[in-house]
Image: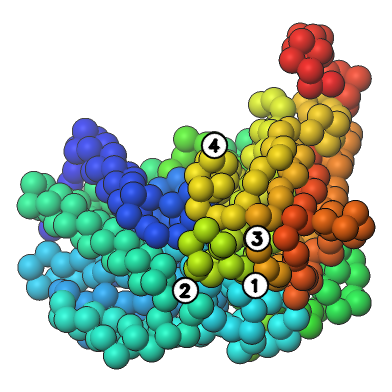
Amino acid sequence: MKTTVDPITRSVVQHRLTAIVNEMGEAMLRTTYSQILNSGRDFSLAICDTNNRLIAQADHIPVHVGALPWATSAVQQAFSEVKSGDIFLLNDPYHGGSHLPDLTAFVPVFDGGRHLFWTVVRAHQSDIGGATHGGYNPRAQEIYQEGLRIPPVKLYDGGVCREDLLKMIASNVRNPRDFRGDLSAMLGAVKLGETRMQKLFAELGSPIVIAAIDQILDASEVQARTTISTWNNGIYEGEAFIDDDGYGRTNVRISAKVTKSDDSIEIDLTDSDEQVVSFLNSPFANMQAAAAVAFFFLIDPETPKNSGALRALSVKARQGTVVWADEGRAVSMCTSHPATEIMQAVMMAMAKACPDRVVAGWGKRFRIAIQGHDPRSGRSFIWHLFHARPGGGASSAGDGWHSGGEWTTVGGLKFGSIELTEARYPLHFHRHELEPGTGGEGKYRGGFGTRLDLELLIDRPAVANTAGDGTEHPPPGVLQGQSGRPHRYLLRRSDGTEMALKTKDVGIQLTPGDILEIHSSGGGGWGNASERPAELIARDRQFGLE
């Protein structure tokens, strides 16, 4: 007999699930070791069921969460027998992972002897081994050059840690102390989620919880389809470009043909360019995640972001292309590029179908990782640039967010306290401020990028790698909105010389007193600039934002 659930109980379950994943996120934030996690917040939490459905997620990094159903599927395929006390890990992009720095931990949730759910955390590690520090290798031509590849493995067996496996993983990263601390935080978060789910079972009974979840997913589907049904039927095409692959190939094209039919849409990426030599390819799960993020941008923001809503979406792609690379290809930049370009191509396609829903282009990722020696502590360090975020794209709701970050993270990545960064690393921020004029003009203007002047207070040479895109193809405007200004990153040497930084480079030598001068991109504009409301023009003038 099918269990019935009243609307109030269903709402209670929905809010409890949201509270659980949010509490898991707070546990991560308060216990991780690395700056990339406890300041940058580059992690995500979710609950999936044993049918690999995304049940609930915390609002962290959307492109992480969209790939998690494929990750739980990979674990279940690898381990047919799962018991209480087991904990699993993976980071393999070809087994449901995104890129190697994103390590994912899974705890099975039981009620009695029945395995019902998974609590999941995916967190970007500050290092994952490989040929270069920091997890990105622009020179990589295969995944084996990018870091330690972890297929689904069992780290805890019935509550007992496999110390040999843990030692093997930690021995392959450059900062094992921070890695072990971050991993412990991840395990604490997923175990906390397990405890809270079991408490929910004890209060309501697992049959009620499962029935409520089925109704939540069904309701999300109805909400998504209701929104889609208001859009214009038709076939729409859009495209976006990656500047280059770092090996001389330029203007790598991502194509999206979107078919909107009644209350569903299909995103067809099959006409995208062939896979590239370098780390800008996407594995299957990441491609699916990027398409899902674009879809969630388009539907009502109040619709829960779960597998129920995704029933209205189907995605087609062709293996061997940049959006779905063959196994073994380098992919470490995939969560930013081509994920950003997949989303951008979908938005460009949908501008005619639902103009009030589309968002103009956001600034692209251009990160720097520095490995050096801290003269104050005598210890080596790896620092990832999370500051100087680019601007977000504008929409019919208004101007884009200033320094909002990249599209795939939708503001989820933070740059953290400047003062804390200076206390933890040998760095000094001479300037970190919004840069007017970087956002694309429009009825609603793109968010501003950032100007950063950062001095290295080191006593011996350090080395930097860059990874990203966005110096040639800026974030586009939509519906007559103008494009934002592209990135411009400079290295000012202590001897007075200056060089422009490339977006895909390794082994950049840094010397004491060098300054990074960064001008990050602004977002694209929405609508015709001649229609900008007078009150917004007056506000811009009042606050010096012209």
How many angstroms separate mark 2 from mark 1 (CA)? 15 Å
Assign a secondary structure to mark 4: loop
| Quadrant where the N terminus is found in the figure | bottom left
> In front of the other: label 2 or label 4?
2
| Dot 1 amino acid type | Tyr
Q: Position of residue 227 (x, y in %)?
A: 57, 38
Q: To which residue does mark 3 refer?
A: 458
Q: Earlier in the sequence, mark 2 or mark 1?
A: 1
Q: Residues within 10 Å of mark 2 (few under 14, many from 20)?
A: many
Q: To which residue does mark 1 refer?
A: 136
Marks 3/1 in contact by CB < 8 Å: the verdict is no
Q: To which residue does mark 4 refer?
A: 300
Q: Earlier in the sequence, mark 4 or mark 3?
A: 4
How many angstroms separate mark 2 from mark 3 (CA)? 19 Å
| Dot 4 amino acid type | Asp
Establish if 302 lies above or below 139.
above
Q: To which residue does mark 2 refer?
A: 175
